[in-house]
Image (spheres, rainbow, N blue to C red):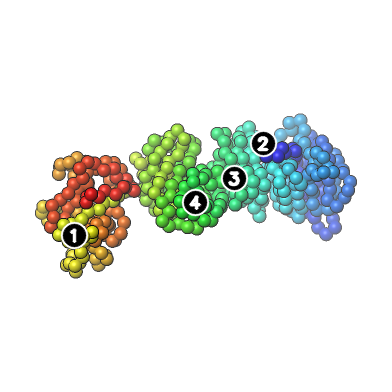
Amino acid sequence: MKRFTQLLLLALLLPAVTGHAQSKVETKDAHSKVRQQVNEKGTAAKTSLPAAGAVAADGEMKVGAGSDRKNEGVIESGNGSGPVSLVIGSGDTLAVDGDMEIVVSGDWQNNGVFKSGSGMVNLTGSGTQAIGNPAGESFNHLTVNKPTGAVQLNGDISVSGTLTLSSGDLDLNGNIADLGSSGTLAESAAGRVKGASGDIRATRDLNAPSALNVAGLGAELSSSPNLGATEIRRGHAPQSGNSNSGIERYYDIIPANNAGLDATLKFNYRQAELNGLTEANLVLFRSTDSGSSWRYQSGTADTTNNTVTQSGIGAFSRWTAAAIDQPIAEIIISANLKAFLEGPFDTDSMRTDLGANIPLAQPYGGAPWNYGGAENVSAIPADVVDWVLIELRSGPLAADSLDSRAAFIKSDGSVVDTSGSGTVSFKVSPGDYYLVLYHRNHLAAMSAITQTLDAVSSLYDFSS
């Protein structure tokens, strides 16, 4: 990175320009001084600003360095007089030429035009500093390096270079920080993005990403298929449901290609975002309706590196982390099963000749099953052979039964939900279970050992 020539601009006011009237640049503090020179637009002269004085300009103040202006444009605050704000007046322009640095100890308020060039704005004051621009502010590089306090957004901002939080937080305050297609977030142990509302976002074209932390936002993605143009939005409002709340972070992941992905998400978070939850209990939840409802997704927590990782993701949407013992949705696990019934078996599949005789409601309510479930359908899905009953046990005995569900078995042996597709779900905690499969005209079958079941479970094939 190029070494920045420092521009310490702690007091700059550019009032409105009307017609041919001259605007001026004022130092707003009696202790401010001009250490070097400022080049005015449209003039060849190099004029120094006096302390607490003014200089005429024609509507644009260009501050910067060039081949013929070495180390120009440095305005320095004097003798610790306290924070001083930078204000660009309505109708005026502050243009940074070259790799210059503007250092501000007070607020940044732009009511005119700021041309950031390839420069940097560095916010260094103590206490809360605000960034305000009714039209939204655009920066090349923006750095927060404060001894105390945070920077608060009073409007949207965009950063095309690096948003660096060396010391001090950036409070979104209900606004958007947009890194676009080129900007990057660089947080540190002493500085993070936060805010009860608003988000920080970026867009990238993702070609089969592998462990890619997109724009430094903390959503680390892997996917064999190309995701295409993908927008990542990171918010910090705790997501809630089921009378519980998650951590103070969520991601909206919006790829152009969002089907059949078999992707992996490594969800990064900060200790300060735990929201009182037990870190070791964190798992992932997914919402397809912007947080109105949630579904448990599992995930492996790494408390050392502050991540929760989930593989086998078919599609992205909104994701957050919450505790398994305080879930924001009912914990639902799946049984992914395959089996063949001897009666209808023919070569490598099962016949469906008797499909018209399959009842619309599950047939296991009587002895010996005595199942009380109310599963029923208005029509039998295609390729269904018959109803089956699945039982989960904590041990090998009938007395160890924990939960049961009626489902369909299809001609290819797959056991599916009553919709005719998808695995069969159970409202029990993730864990190891014996699997028992019943059919009304065949002997029951049970797995020889326990099988690990979670939101996404590996296939267990009774026929092999």
> How far across and down, in percent of the image, does residue 131 sit?
65, 46
Q: What is the x, y in percent for residue 420? A: 28, 61
Residue in front for this viewpoint, 4 or 59: 4
Q: Amino acid at mark 1?
A: Phe
Task: Give the residue type at disc 2.
Answer: Gly
User: Do the numbered discs 4 and 2 sit on residues whose CB atoms are within 8 Å?
Assistant: no
Residue 67 seen in this snapshot = yes
The label shown at residue 184 is 3
The residue at which mark 1 appears reads as 345
Name the N-terminal-most of marks 1 and 2: 2
Considering the numbered disc 3 on the image, is that residue within a helix, a strand or a loop?
strand
Secondary structure of residue under mark 1: strand
Q: CA distance from mark 4 to mark 1?
A: 41 Å
Residue 70 sits in quarter: top right
Q: Specify few, some or many for label 3: CA neighbours under 10 Å numbering under 14, 14-19, or 20 or more.
A: many
- Among numbered discs 4 and 3, the one appearing first in the sequence: 3
- Give the labeled residue for mark 4: 208
Mark 2, secondary structure of its residue: loop
Residue under the point 34% across and 48% down = 456
**Nearer the camera: disc 1 or disc 2:** 1
Name, please, the residue furthest toward the left.
367
At label 4, the amino acid type is Ala
Residue at which label 2 appears: 125
The front one of 145 and 212 is 212
Q: Earlier in the sequence, mark 2 or mark 3?
A: 2
Three-letter amino acid code of the residue under disc 3? Thr
Measure how far apart labels 2 and 3 are at the Cα level.
23 Å
Extreme-right residue of the structure: 45
Q: CA distance from mark 1 to mark 3?
A: 58 Å
Q: What crowding class fits label 4: few (fewer than 14 Cα within 10 Å), some (14-19), or many (20 or more)? A: some
Circle nearer the N terminus (4, 1): 4
